[in-house]
Every structure is written in structure tokens, then in C-alpha cells.
Image: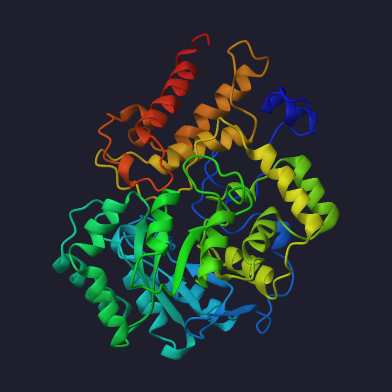
Amino acid sequence: MKKDITRREFLKAAGTGALVAGVAGAAGLAGCKGRRGSQEGFSGAEGAAGEVPTDKMTYRVSNRSGDKVSLLGYGCMRWPLLPDNSAIDQEKVNELVDYAIEHGVNYFDTAPVYIRGWSETATGIALARHPRESFYIATKASGPFGPAFSFEDGVEMYRNSLKNLQVEYLDYYLLHNLGRSVENFHQRFIDNGLLDFFLAEKAAGRIRNLGWSFHGSKEVFDYVLGYEGVEWDFCQIQLNYQDWKYPIGAAVNAEYLYEELVKKGVPAVIMEPLLGGRLARVPAQALEMMKAMRPNDSAAQWAFRFAGTPPGVLNVLSGMVYMEHLQENIRTFAPLEPVTEEENKVLETTRDILADANYIQCTTCQYCMPCPYGLDIPGVFAHYNKCVSDGELLESSTDPEYKEARRAFLIGYDRSVPRLRQAHHCIECEQCKPKCPQGINIPAEMRRVDEYAEKLRTKANF
């Protein structure tokens, strides 16, 4: 492939003109065709057929605690909502949790800030219906990600987590979202005495494993990992085949993070194995290579297998809103078939194709939400990125496919993001900017999306 080939030219050369979307229906992310969903973890009907085994789950044993943990973990950052989005659909959550436990999943990860503060309570209700020894629960010391976090606030949040989850102890407790700066780490957990409090709770048995989740700079990662006087029981990092050696944006390459954890004997819990769902939608050329090797596997299954292959990985998290998500992921990890050297070459080729500068590096984690002005920041970015993936982002108003691509973008935008929540309402207050774990300049990217949409609406030349 010529180095100067455009993405649209590549996609046309591949014979499709578009990336292969993982799901043709409700599970697809926001896109030019107007589809919208919110979930990582399911990428194609081709992976949805067949038996879902109940007794073949792959487990890893923690070298710290001896816990036998399912390699597939349930991320509870997204649960199904009622049709009017007014609350979590508890009946569906119960059904998903029951099915997961019946099929060998025993690790559930939540946080006080997830789903407008509802996730812990919903997760606790579902899990309380099962024997306490049948699951591990992980939650987080979230709080303000800035410095304004007092000892009293942290203790209250911790005790509320125990109450909301209906448990007397927490299996895995994380200092949430470290990495902005060493100063921020000290302000949130050291200077106020919270880390000492959590260590005391661990000594008392109310926290069984104490760890932290990382988004940020290599320097902060090294500092926290080696923090004197603390032996961390686990660490949650972003790991996927795109970020392994050559991460895009502000991420630190996952290979480095993983190897440093291995050196310290710290088990790794993995987040973003699909990079916000992006690795579930790959170019046709890449999918053809994947299918030639493993005809029955979806692109998402390849990504999950990569994330679970390193032996130092304790657990790979996936948020699963639909039963289809859960079933496909159980098949992938029951049992896991590690990625081979030959398969890694396919993933390296896929990674190179996906490294498109037009992408906004949003993983739809929703940490930027809620926007004080009601904007749907992840929805805006998801729609724009889908158009990049589909090769439908126009480079010029003289493009021969201008009319079709213009219509696809604008209609899809209005269908997936209500007008009052679109980018043109952004006033660039920058309240979202410090909250983004990927370091995205959100106001600038919102402006970029709005400027592109405005050109299409006014039929301006560009």
C-alpha cells in the first residue's frame, strides 16, 4: 500500500468503501448510518451462534491473594436502562448477572461515579441474590479527580460503597484514575491520609486487595508503582493490540506498563480491550486475514484474546449491556485460546491501518459526563469516528461522493445525537478537559466536529 494513499482510497481498494461494522443492529456504535449503542464487547452475528459453555471458563490465580479469578470480568460502567433512561433496568441487570455467574464469570467491577451514581446500587442488588463466596467485587475511591478530596469525603464514599454493594468487605478496591501528576496523587490520597486509612482497612480485612487504575504519564505510573511502603495487590491498565507498542494520543504503550507490573509481581486487570469498541470494527482487508485463520471469530474476539493472552493478566474487563455481548465474550474466554505469533502479525497489520490521524481518540468512557450544558460528548465523537471508520469523511466538497456522504453524516448525526446535545452548543468552558483519561482536548475536538458539520449543512466549499 502506498504511504500517501488516503483512507478513502484504501477502503475503495479493499473493495468495500467502508469498514466492516461489528453489528448491523442495536449493538453498533453511533455512526453515519444512524446506528447507536453503548457497549464494548460484541462485534458480529457470526460470533453469536453456538453453545455457551458453563464449565470451561479460563481462570487466573492471583499471586497476591490466591484468588481464582475468571479471566473475563464484568465491567459495570454501563448497565441497561429503562426506555426513558430514568433509571437502570434492574430486572435485566439481574438476568445478566445470573447468567454470567452461571457461566463462570466471578469478577464484577463498578465505581461510585458510574451511570450517574447508580451502578453500585444496581450491581449490589443483583449480586446480593448469590452466595457471597461466588463472586469478587471491585469498586473505587473515585471522588473528585482534582485535588479537592478530603479525608472525610473519601471515608464516606468508601463506606457508602460497602452499603450500596450490600457487602461487609470489598475484594478489590482501587485508587481511581491516577496518572495526572505526582502532585495530584499526593493531594487525593497521601496528604489527606486516605491511603493510610485504606491500608488499615486492608489490615482489618475489609479490603482484601488494594490497587489503583491508571490513566496518564509514564512518570506518574513509575512513581505510584514504586511508592515506598505499599505493596500493591493489582493495577488496572489500558491494554489492547493498538496500544501495545504504539499507542495513539496520550496513552502510554501497554507493553511497558505490563512489563513493569510483571517485574513487581503485580497482577494486571485490563480495561479498554476494544479501545472503546473501535477494535470491534476493522477494515475489510484485516477482517479477511482474520477470517482466513479463524473463520468463526469476530474482530472483537481477536482483540479480547490478545488482551487475555499475557500470563500476568488476571482479568479482562468488558461492559456487556446485551445478552449477546455476554454470550460471545464467554465463548471467547471459555476457554481462552492464546494469540499465536502468526496471529500477532495480522493484528500488527490491522493496527497500522487503524492508526488514522482523523480519529478522535475517545474510548466513550464517559468520565467527561455530564456536560454542564447538556452536550453528549461521547455520542458526538462516536458518530464522527464512525464516519472516519466508514471512509465517509469528506476531504473536499468536490468529492464525487459528496452528496451521499453529506446526507449520511447529517442524518446520522441527528439520529444518534439530539440537536440540543450536538457540538455546536459547546461554549468551550473546558470543565470536561481535565476529566478525560486520554488527554483529549475536548473543546477543540468538539469545534472540529462542529466546523465539519457546519460546512456540510451550509454546503460550503472546502
x and y percent of residue 41 in the render?
58, 59
Q: Quadrant of residue 334?
A: bottom right
The percent coordinates of residue 284 (x first, y second) are 75, 41
Is 282 on the left or on the right of 431, as rendered?
right
Q: Tag count in the figure?
A: 0
Q: Residue at x 71, y 22 (%)?
A: 4
**Quick one: 100 or 324, which is closer to the camera?**
100
Q: Residue furthest right?
A: 292
The residue depicted at 54 percent of the width and 41 percent of the height is 248
Which residue appears farthest toward the front when viewing the image? Answer: 228
Figure quadrant of the N terminus: top right
- Judge by depth and name the residue closer to the eye, 455 or 408: 455
In this rendering, is residue 123 above or below 13? below
Q: Is residue 335 visible?
A: yes
Which color mode does the image show?
Answer: rainbow
- Residue 359, given in percent of the width and then of the height, sits at 54, 35
Q: Nearer the viewer, residue 87 or 376?
A: 376
Identity of the residue drawn at 31% across and 53% down: 182
Image quadrant where residue 441 sits? top left
Instruction: State whether residue 298 is above or below residue 5.
Output: below
Residue 369, image x, y percentages: 33, 47
Q: Of 181 and 131, which appears nearest the observer?
A: 181
